[in-house]
Image (cartoon, grey):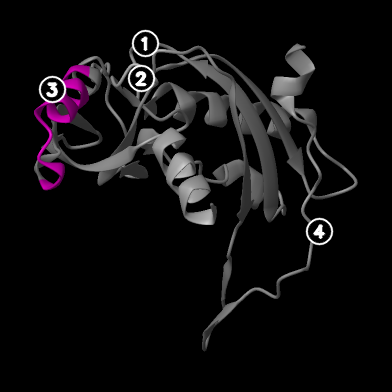
Amino acid sequence: MIELFAALLLQNAALEADCRLTADLQSGRRSNRVRSLTVDCAAHDDPALQAAAEQIVSQIDLDFWFGSNVLIAGQVWFEQNESGDWQALPGQFVIYSNLQIPVRLVESGYRQLSCAYAAHPDRRGRLADPETLCFIHEFSEPDFLIREANRDLLHDLERSRMLPTAIDYCFEDEVHITASVMVVTQFSVEPEEEEDYPELDIVSLCDAED
């Protein structure tokens, strides 16, 4: 009976598969772009998976430039739905522009920044109408620095892409950044003494939409 129950669980479980992703990059003097993305699912020997993966990846909007802080996924995941069709698992970044702490924030003496964001990835992989919320880990949080941090995060989200899915969903995440500053003296270069700031509990922006 136990073996039969386990077999039924395996039969009802969604079948997942990972495929290798390769990016053809174009490098520029100040920024780069992705010319094309190639997906390879040959390890699973499933023509239907390969065709679905190619069709999904081809939808991603690549018409944008990004800076040096970009990360590009090396693999993407798919699952079979109840009809046996392959679809993308939600919540996967294909191109991610990694948030950096604003220079003016560090120059003003601040070392830690926490931000939350939420967005609905669209059918081209873009993070549509993102909501952002940034905090500086100090009692005094200058409004102009908070605005700059939010602008930088929005800019990075505009230069990021997620794997398109057939469903509409709200994706959210948090970013916590600590800047390391080197103090240069006449005789040596030493790291600035770091303070231990607690991470903030940031409210769910997706829940705030309800």
Quarter the C terminus occupies: top right
Q: Quadrant of residue 205?
A: top right
Numbered badge on residue 51: 3
Three-letter code, disc 3? Ala
- Between 21 and 152, the one lying in front of the other is 21
Q: Is residue 49 magenta?
A: yes
From this view, report whether residue 97 is shown above or below residue 55. Answer: below
- Disc 1 marks which amino acid? Arg
Mark in the foreground, 3 or 1: 3
Q: Nearer the viewer, mark 4 or mark 2?
A: 2
Residue 198 vs residue 10, the one in the foreground? 10
Please count the marks in the image: 4
Residue at horizontal 27%, vertical 44%? 75
- Dot 4 corresponds to which residue? 198
Quadrant of the rendered structure where residue 16 is? top left
Residue 88, x across and y down, in percent: 35, 26
For the stretch drawn in magenta, what is the main secondary structure? helix
Residue 123 numbered mark, or none? 1
Contact between marks 4 and 2 (CB within 8 A): the answer is: no
Residue 39 location, quadrant? top left
Indicate which label's residue lies in the foreground, 1 or 4.
Answer: 1
**Please, is residue 151 above or below residue 110 in the view?**
above
Calculate the distance from the C-alpha at mark 2 to the C-alpha at mark 3: 15 Å
Q: Residue at x 74, y 13 (%)?
A: 209
Image x and y of residue 123, in percent: 36, 10
Cα–Cα span, label 4 and label 2:
35 Å
Q: Badge 2 local density, few (<14 within 10 Å), some, or many (20+)?
A: many
**Residue kind at label 4, given as amino acid type:** Pro
Which residue is depicted at the point 57% across and 42% down?
A: 102
User: Which disc, if any, is residue 164?
Assistant: 2
Q: Pick out the residue farthest to the front.
A: 1
Mark 1 surroundings within 10 Å by alpha-carbon count, few (fewer than 14), some (14 through 19), many (20 or more): some
